[in-house]
Amino acid sequence: MPEDLQTPCLLLDETVMRQNIRGMAERFKSIGISLRPHLKTAKSAHIAHILQEHGADRWTVSTLKEAEYFAQAGLTDMLYAVSIIPQKMERLMNLNRKGAQMSLCLDSPEMAKHLSEMKLEGPNPGVYLEVDVDGHRTGVKADQQRAIETARIVSKASNLDFAGVMAHGGGISYAASGRQELEAAAEQERTGTLAVKEALMSAGLPCPNVSIGSTPTALFGTSYEGVTDVRAGVYVFQDVFQANLGMCALEDIAATVLTSVISHAPHLNRIVIDAGGLALSKDRSCASQTNDCSYGFLADLDGHIDPLLYVEGVSQEHGYITTRDGNPLPFELYPLGSQLRVLPNHSCMTVAAYENYQVINGEHDHECWQRCNHW
């Protein structure tokens, strides 16, 4: 590891990340279903090219800034998986004019009608009808007339190509506990999405593609019959929340935050580090889980995890470490100026604070990889 790194900074263990990528790629290669990796967490062309090495040829993005960045890196066939609004269409169409093959999603006849009446210069974008499989976010359900109405408007539009249906089972899968519930969540995602496809086809409408996915449903699904591709993203890095779900071991977490010890507070049984809420995020996903890490677990510079330590709290630029069992801290093991690595609660939110990755433990050890942030 470079000795001159300023903290806090974002470390990426290339060896661990490649193992995560390879595992998911091999799973879906054996199943015979295409992966459409979600790049919203990685936001790195270097990482996208590693995904390509393992067969990825289609992509998911969550911002048009990502789409523009990855298009410049040569990626095509990208699904912008956030409900579209008219104000963003010119940026999307500009990408299509340059060959990016962009698709979008929507869930209302109002938006479908609005887009169908717009003058869109360039190759038609694909349009997915978003399905609500768990009441978690956006989308339509099979028993809603608006599903058929929306798809019919898109199918008839001369400036749009109806691509099919898509869903993200993030509510059911992230709330699941144990293999049985995770398998049930994956099946609910699949069958709920297929139910909308069946409703469309019964109404005489084509439905070429069925796209589903989240990391838990990708890893625990027992059937992908009727599915065209699967979207997942956090598996590339993993995090404590995913480990608690059973997606991985803590040792499979590839992205960690390097931090320095800046103060001791023996009267509070506390070690203070220079990674606070801005460096770690204030996401508390694990609060709903038995193995709550608060704002992160701790490892040494070599990645060896200390199971007794956790970041119990944060302020803007300070993180507060103490023991999970209330026993006194061994302050002598963590002198001022020493460094630790924080395993993030939710890597998607943590890595978003950083402009680049400091790569360790791989063929690109000591390299600095840029990220694409913002919108």
Image (cartoon, rainbow, N blue to C red):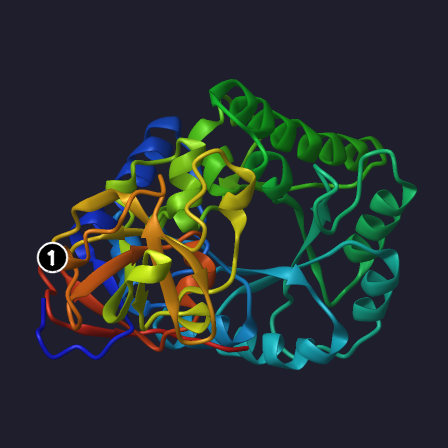
Where 130 falls versus 256 (above or below)? above
Quadrant of residue 112 within the rendered picture: bottom right
Element at badge 1? loop
Q: In this orientation, which residue lies closer to the viewer: 83 or 137?
A: 137
Question: Which x, y percent locates residue 175?
Answer: 59, 35
Identify which residue, 327 or 39, lies in the foreground.
Answer: 327
Residue 106 on image: x %, y %: 73, 57
Task: Name the quarter where the C terminus is drawn.
Answer: bottom right
Residue 99 in view in this figure: no
Q: Quadrant of the N terminus?
A: bottom left
Q: Could you tell me which residue is drawn at 80 percent across and 39 percent down?
A: 141
Residue 41: image location, x then y, percent: 43, 60
Residue at 71% of width from left, 37% of height from top? 134
Let me know if residue 51 appears in the view: yes
Image check: 118 left or right of 234? right
Instruction: Name which residue type carries label 1.
Output: Asn
Q: Which residue is mark 1?
A: 361
Please, which residue is most extreme toward the right here?
145
- Residue 19 placed where, x, y %? 22, 43
